[in-house]
Amino acid sequence: MPWMSRRSVAETAAAMTRLRDQVADLKQQLAEQGRAAGRLARRTAAAEGAVAGASAALTAGRREVLAENARLRALVDQLRTANRGLTSQLENALGYTAEEIALLDAGTEVSTR
């Protein structure tokens, strides 16, 4: 084994102590980062679960709205059909000609007979 001075041995020992301290600090920082990452992962999973629940609720709500719109559209179509039929019956009962009906539809007055 080669000969080393006491100073060199002391410097090497001090350097080793500093390196051990740095390694211990790095291990502590790594452990804290791991705990922080775990907390973040749990919060992320909780947020993803909340988003999935909200998405499912929105999808169900959208389905209900679409069904209600379809029901209302069918009702409006029925009312329009009934209105056209009643208007046609009224026009026939009043004896208007096609030209007079066109004038009425345009918003002009038709002279009474």
Image (cartoon, rainbow, N blue to C red):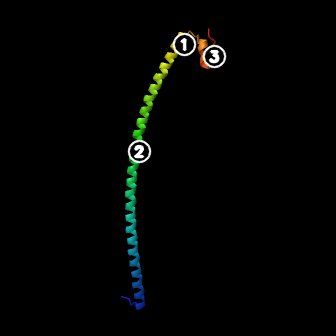
Residue at the disc numbered 1: 91
- Neighbor class of circle 1 (other Cα within 10 Å; few <14, some 14-19, many 20+) is some
Which disc, if any, is residue 55? 2
Q: Are marks 2 and 1 in contact (CB under 8 Å)?
A: no
Labels in figure, total: 3
* Foreground: disc 2 or disc 1: 1
Residue at the disc numbered 3: 109
Tell me where residue 11 appears, x and y as whole percent: 42, 86
Name the amino acid type tagged 1: Glu
**Foreground residue among 51 and 1:** 51
The Cα–Cα distance between marks 3 and 1, rounded to whole angstroms, is 14 Å
Q: Secondary structure at mark 1?
A: helix
Q: Earlier in the sequence, mark 3 or mark 1?
A: 1
Which disc, if any, is residue 15? none
Dividing the picture into quadrants, the one containing residue 99 is top right
- Neighbor class of circle 3 (other Cα within 10 Å; few <14, some 14-19, many 20+) is few
Q: Earlier in the sequence, mark 3 or mark 2?
A: 2
Q: Is residue 82 visible?
A: yes
Tell me where residue 83 appears, x and y as whole percent: 50, 19
**Foreground residue among 17 and 81:** 81
Q: Quadrant of the N terminus?
A: bottom left
The Cα–Cα distance between marks 2 and 1, rounded to whole angstroms, is 53 Å
Tell me where residue 97 appears, x and y as whole percent: 59, 10
Name the amino acid type tagged 3: Glu
Q: Which residue: 45% across, 22% down?
A: 78
**Foreground residue among 5 and 30:** 30
